[in-house]
Amino acid sequence: METEQNLYHVSDLVANLKEVVETHFGAVLVEGELSNFRRYRSGHCYFTLKDEAAQLRCVMWKGLAQYVFFEPRDGMLVRVQGHASVYDARGELQLVTRSMQLAGEGALQKAFEALKQRLDAEGLFSPRHKRALPPYPETIGIITSGDGAALHDIVSILGRRFPQVRVLVCPVHVQGLGASEEIAEAIRTFNALPAGDPLRPDVLITGRGGGSAEDLWAFNEEAVARAIFDADIPIVSAVGHETDYSISDFVADVRAATPSMAAELVVPDRRDVAVLVYGLYGYLHDTVSAQVDGHRQRILALTRSYRFHKPVERLRQHQQRLDEMTARLHRIIRHRLDGERRRVDALERRLDVLDPRRPLLRGYVRVERNGAPVHEAAHLQKNDQIVLHFQDGTRLARIDT
């Protein structure tokens, strides 16, 4: 029969179990499949590890989660290190995780190759999507760690090669949990700026200095690859050293072996520009000089010509021709006027002959009745009123018989 001596309060029993668990499993390495991975705004991560027969709840605090070099996703096979404990509030066994790595032989390389093949099949690496870098950019955006040597190298080289370029820096974490999302968000933010905005870069550099494969892993995440592919601004990927290749290198418009080389790729050397300007100046000078010489030779040829030295004679020839044409015109006009004058005289003579007043001057009288001329005496009747027209006036008369 149980006595009160064996009676535990829940919290006491949980505390005892917790002590036993933590004492016997103070440092363990566990391998399993990720499930229900969640990262809260606080930065703490909660997930489950499982295999064919069991599952185990896990927690990773923010201070340690930032050192996870990849973005954990459900279904990944991982190996975590930590210590077993009991969550008092629920009385649940959990693993307080200190570190997390991809599990299996060559797990990093397998994950890299799997994502690379999938994105390549989707066309994200296709050359037809690559954009050319502007030859003379005015603004360059840099997405990298704010306190890394890579940023210092890039800014120094830009200032030395092309000091008039404006540099905009968006500092981000370049390794650890959440770094890939920060990088992708920075790319999207720059691209969201409208065309014509003074803060919109003409080209972007994203990358970091060298490190281990785990340190560079943020640039192997799909989120970064998608952001680069969707960007309108040309992007140069500069991750690690010359022998390091990342997924972002394949998606970007241009890969630079190092951050320093990226700076050399995006801007011309001012000395080369000076040489080009001097060359163009020489070309323009020679071209204009040749044109001036050509026109000078043409003018000299004209001044030596017969026509150039006989302008008065040519003018007199034209004056003589003008006089001849003027005289000819006068003759034509006189001839036309004489002809018209003769025609007018003939018409006047005809009109004079037909003038009804001429017979009256010779003593004849014109007889009218009711405003109409009377040509025969038979047309008049007794008592008809008539008008007699003389050369100097008219008289009224009446027919008596």
Image: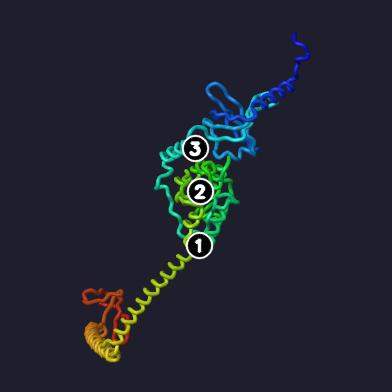
- Which of these two is toward me, 345 or 234? 234
Q: Position of residue 174 (x, y in %)?
A: 56, 46
Q: Of discs 3 and 1, which sits in the foreground?
A: 3
Q: Residue at x 49, y 46 (%)?
A: 228
Q: Note whether 112 is above or below 3 in the view shown.
A: below
Classed neighbour count for the residue bearing mark 1: other residues with Cα under 10 Å, few (<14), some (14–19), many (≥20): some
Indicate the secondary structure of the residue bearing disc 1.
helix
Q: Note whether 236 is above or below 322 in the view shown.
A: above
Indicate the secondary structure of the residue bearing disc 2.
loop
The amino acid type found where label 3 is placed reads Leu
The amino acid type found where label 2 is placed reads Gly
Using residue 141 as the reference point, say whether residue 401 is left or right of it: left
Residue under label 3, please give it: 108
Residue 261, labelled with which disc? none
Residue 240, labelled with which disc? 2
The amino acid type found where label 1 is placed reads Arg
**Is the Cβ of the residue at disc 3 closer than 8 Å to that at disc 1?**
no
- The answer to whether any part of residue 52 appears in the image is yes
Q: CA distance from mark 2 to mark 1?
A: 22 Å
Q: Note whether 293 is above or below 127 in the view shown.
A: below
The image quarter containing residue 119 is top left
Indicate the secondary structure of the residue bearing disc 3.
helix
Q: Residue at x 45, y 51 (%)?
A: 254
Q: Residue at x 64, y 31 (%)?
A: 96
Earlier residue among tags 3 and 1:
3
Q: Position of residue 292 (x, y in %)?
A: 36, 78
Residue under label 1, please give it: 161
Using residue 266 as the reference point, say whether residue 149 is left or right of it: right
Q: Position of residue 51 (x, y in %)?
A: 54, 24
